[in-house]
């Protein structure tokens, strides 16, 4: 065997080992990403399960606010469908973006529902609504923490598949960038709070 052939075999072997190591790292990062979404999925399901109870309690008090109640129900159904799509597809960026939009719409509808509850003292004082509101607030906090962990996993994954020369393995093996989940807070809620002295 000639020295040139040995060098070529060593280079091919080294490239194969490198590609296998990089591929396995991408798989581990993708699995961490999926696990991160699974944690969010549990909390989103809990959130979606709380919405019908809120609507049922509010329905008795808000008979003339049917449009608000129907929009909350529709937003919940849309968010649940988007969550199921992401759970089925994994780190698909388009599905994540649809989920993000659906969850923001649900948050907006819930904000309107709670704003209406403020205008109805009897509804605001309802023990069931108060309990459900507290559970929803707790769930929102859990979603926020899970979203942060998921977004950290997305950052690690997206960075890894974009690094040179690892991006060759990523492109060749079908690893695609994932999307971040954004806050479900509305643009108005993100505005700075004005403090009057």
Image (cartoon, helix red, strand yellow):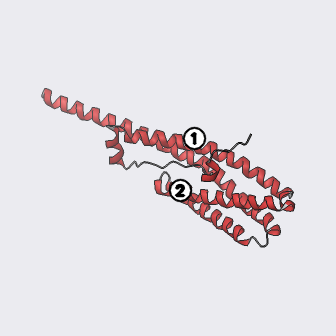
Task: Say which of 62 and 15 sits in front.
Answer: 62
* The disc label shown at residue 26, or none: none
For the point 39% across and 42% down, which residue is it?
Answer: 161
Position of residue 62 measured from the top left corner of the image (x, y, whole percent):
79, 68
Q: CA distance from mark 1 to mark 2?
A: 17 Å
Position of residue 168 measured from the top left corner of the image (x, y, whole percent):
31, 43
Please state if 108 lies on the left or on the right of 65 as rendered: left
Q: Is residue 28 visible?
A: no
User: Which quadrant is home to the N terminus?
Assistant: top left
List the residue tagged with mark 1: 149
Secondary structure under the numbered disc 2 in the rendered image: helix
Secondary structure under the numbered disc 1 in the rendered image: helix
Q: Quadrant of residue 141?
A: top right
Contact between marks 1 and 2 (CB within 8 A): the answer is: no
- Mark 1 or 2, nearer chain start: 2
List the residue tagged with mark 2: 86
For the point 65% across and 62% down, which residue is it?
Answer: 76
For the point 52% across and 59% down, which residue is it?
Answer: 98
Position of residue 143 measured from the top left corner of the image (x, y, whole percent):
64, 47
Position of residue 79 measured from the top left corner of the image (x, y, whole percent):
60, 60
Task: Say which of 74 and 197 sits in front.
Answer: 197
Is residue 21 placed above or below 3 in the rendered structure? below
Is residue 8 placed above or below 122 in the rendered structure? above
């Amino acid at each position: 065997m000639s020295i040139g052939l040995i060098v070529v075999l060593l280079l091919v072997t080294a490239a194969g080992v490198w590609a296998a190591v990089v591929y396995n790292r991408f798989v581990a990062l993708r699995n961490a990403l999926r696990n991160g979404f699974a944690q969010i999925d549990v909390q989103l399901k809990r959130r979606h399960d709380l919405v019908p109870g809120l609507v049922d309690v509010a329905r008795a008090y808000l008979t003339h606010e049917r449009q608000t109640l129907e929009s909350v129900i529709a937003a919940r159904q849309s968010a649940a469908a988007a969550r199921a799509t992401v759970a089925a597809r994994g780190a698909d960026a388009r599905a994540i973006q649809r989920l993000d939009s659906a969850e923001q719409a649900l948050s907006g509808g819930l904000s309107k529902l709670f704003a209406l509850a403020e205008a109805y003292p009897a509804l605001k004082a309802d023990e069931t609504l108060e309990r459900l509101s507290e559970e929803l607030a707790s769930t929102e906090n859990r979603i926020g923490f899970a979203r942060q962990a998921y977004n950290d996993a997305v950052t690690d994954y997206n960075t890894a598949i974009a690094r040179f020369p690892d991006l060759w393995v990523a492109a060749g093996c079908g690893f695609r960038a994932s999307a971040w989940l954004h806050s479900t807070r509305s643009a108005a809620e993100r505005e700075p709070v004005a403090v009057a002295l």
